[in-house]
Image: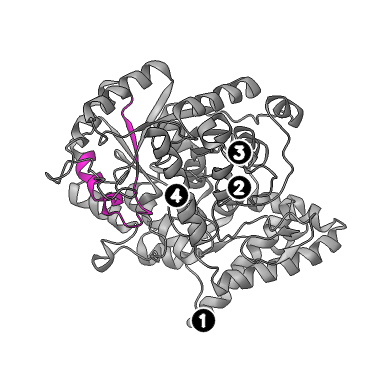
Amino acid sequence: MGRQEGTRLHWKDEDPGLPIKFGPCSNAEYDPEPLSPLVRETIRRARDECERNARRTGMSRREFLLSICGAATTLLALDACTRESVREVSPGTTPGGGYSIPPEATTDPEVAHDAIGGEEFVFDIQGHLLEYDLNPILNGQDFWDRFPQKNCGEDDPRVCYSIESFLELMFLRSDTSMLVLSALPIYPAGSPLSTEIMDETRRIAEGLCRDERVLLHAQALPNLDPSESSLDAMDDTVARYPIAAWKTFTHFPDVFESNGKGWWLDDRDPDLPQVGERFIDRAVRLGVPTICAHKGFSGSSPYASPRDIGPAAKRHPEANFVVYHSGFEAGVPEGPYSSATANVGVNRLITSMKRAGIGPNENVYAELGSTWWYTMRYPVQAAHLLGKLLRYVGEDNVLWGTDCLFYGSPQDQIQALRSFHISEEFQERFGYPKLTRRIKDKILGLNGADLYRVEPITDRCEFSRRELERLRRHLPGRNRTLGPSTTAEAGAFRELDHAAIAQDVG
């Protein structure tokens, strides 16, 4: 039996699930949250409306759920439920953000395309896959018996996270036309997302699409002992691969090991490894001065705070600092920036920039991976999130990333942003900009192209399923997430990968 995300209710095998996926799901860097009453009501209402609209349009239920009208129907249900929820608390008021979906979009594909479709350039700077099939040490029976996502929809769960699944979800099932493969907080040796695997993916995409639409991050872990060897490894990586930027984690391996130590980009703590300055200097010297740092979704580690971003950026104007997740924390509601909330969630990034004298559109960038996925279900929070980042980080410096394939195809995230608006009230009260088409185009791709100094590729990569099958195997189509959906699964996912890699390292 098929299962709709978040409901634990079983539908028929042919039902692909709602086109806007609500979870619960995570990227394993935070624990998935149970669905709120608002989201549960949205799912119930969207399911009923999709059933009715499928009959009105003469489509099967499956066809409608995979259509653009199905996505419009689901977003309209979310918008309506949000409005009702806000009015229950404050009669006569409206949400600070929402989705602009005409009712006609639920049955008219042309109207739906005007609302949530688009031909703009979409450049996703945070994509992940887990190519276990190329890592023999990870393929023992014991590993797969313990793998928390073994019921991801395939007989062999390796298929769900593989190179071919990634390319299909990103390029065939979404409007993404360029992407960056970004490293995960896993030891390099034997990693299912090693530099070698990322480069293999890049070369496969180049063969299919006949262009260079996949860029690579290199993982940098300068705090590993001996640190000089870790820094020297950066030279070797740049010599061997076409690296576009560095991905680093100031909280890794602190989150996994009792004796592990985090570090700071600005070397602020003399009791921690003093590697931040040397790492930044090395990145600049190697001609790859863009540093992407995981900040947010910190779990139990204080080192994932963005407090060091402002000082590091001020000291190194020759480098670019991309704050992955924008400092967002799951379970911490996003509201307006104020002195009382200056040190929570995304506001920590803003505070760090303010204290260092870094203004909008300078050398600090905010990335939306997992952050938009999380907040798009809560339009009021989403309005504060985007409004603050655009105001304080700058409309040229907010970057599109999705953290997919953990959340399946990113198409629903793209459609949600296209139709999202910040209310006039929030614009007036908090100084947030209006979400114009121009600003959305910049967020979805143009800002990333400017940062990475690439010419936007706007042509769709129209490789066929047959061509992809020749590479590996065929995948059926569904609307689904792939990341862990419970706290236990998220913890198991982290522990399993770490244990497998540690075994290889040992």
Residue 385 image offset from top left, x and y in percent: 41, 58
User: Disc 4 or 1, which lies upstream in sequence?
Assistant: 1
User: Disc 2 or 3, which lies upstream in sequence?
Assistant: 3
Quadrant of the image containing the C terminus: top left
Please report the bounds of the magenta region as a residue range: 288-313
User: Is residue 427 highlighted in magenta?
Assistant: no
Q: Which of marks 2 and 3 is in front?
A: 2
User: Is residue 303 highlighted in magenta?
Assistant: yes
C-alpha distance separating marks 1 and 2 = 38 Å
Q: Which residue is drawn at 24% across and 45% down?
A: 261
In this picture, is 36 found above or below 231? below
Which residue is identified by label 1? Answer: 92
Q: Is mark 4 on a helix, strand or loop?
A: helix
User: Disc 3 or 1, which lies upstream in sequence?
Assistant: 1
Which residue is identified by label 3? Answer: 170
**Which quadrant of the view contains residue 65?**
bottom right
Q: Which of marks 3 and 4 is in front?
A: 4
Q: What element carries label 3?
A: helix
